[in-house]
Amino acid sequence: MISVCPQEPAVIKFLSGLGNIKFFGKLYLMSKEQIIERADELLKLLGLYDNRKRLAKGYSGGMLRQLSLIIALINDPEILFLDEPTVGMDPRNRRKVWELLDSIKQKKKTIILTTHFIEEAEALCDRVAIIDYGKLIAIGSPKKLIEEHEVKNLEEVFMKITGRRILEGI
């Protein structure tokens, strides 16, 4: 039911991209047929299909992030934890990930996302929690937070309500 995509790519570098996916699919007790069907779908969606047989040690940082996300999605989880899933991705691949996450969200699955990309949180999240120096300082929908703080976007909310200690010299 639950899967995680950690901040650092969780891949076995001496396996191919597809070898990694198969390995993790087996850990979820998926059949070979299920693994291949789901792997092909995700590899094509994220643009890694042509590189599926390359060893992961030859992947770029962005490709490793994509592979790590595919591994997290192989079992079609109900709850997905993502820690900085698009760090190191070029804008085109980042947008592919956004579209994929939106399609997962439309299936009424739960995604818990940590990100420093405020526009990513605004685009993808129904609810946002802003944490400053380890304290929860705001929570709500992006729209509600924007209206409440009378600004144009979520990044302006963040800038308005965080960093007080820095500004105050603490």
Image (cartoon, rainbow, N blue to C red):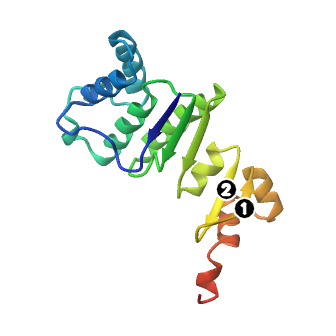
Residue 138 image offset from top left, x and y in percent: 72, 61
Q: Amino acid at mark 1?
A: Ala
Q: Are marks 2 and 1 in contact (CB under 8 Å)?
A: yes
Q: Which residue is mark 2?
A: 129
**Quadrant showing the C terminus:** bottom right
Residue 156 image offset from top left, x and y in percent: 68, 65
Asked which quadrant contains residue 33, the reply is top left
Label 2 to label 1: alpha-carbon separation: 6 Å
Residue 20 image offset from top left, x and y in percent: 28, 30
Q: Nearer the viewer, residue 69 or 49?
A: 69
Label of residue 170 in the image: none
* Farthest-out residue, bottom: 169
Residue 139 image offset from top left, x and y in percent: 73, 56
Side of 30 relative to 77 (left or right): left
Badge 1 local density, few (<14 within 10 Å), some, or many (20+)? some
Q: Nearer the viewer, residue 55 or 76?
A: 76
Asked which quadrant contains residue 62, the reply is top left
Q: Amino acid at mark 2?
A: Ala
Which mark sits nearer the N-terminus, 2 or 1?
2
User: Which residue corresponds to the image point at 50% horizontal and 40% vertical from the top-left?
Assistant: 95
Q: Which residue is mark 1?
A: 138
Q: Which secondary structure lies at badge 1?
A: strand
Q: Nearer the viewer, residue 158 or 45?
A: 158
Q: Which secondary structure lies at badge 2?
A: strand
Badge 2 local density, few (<14 within 10 Å), some, or many (20+)? some
* Farthest-out residue, top: 33
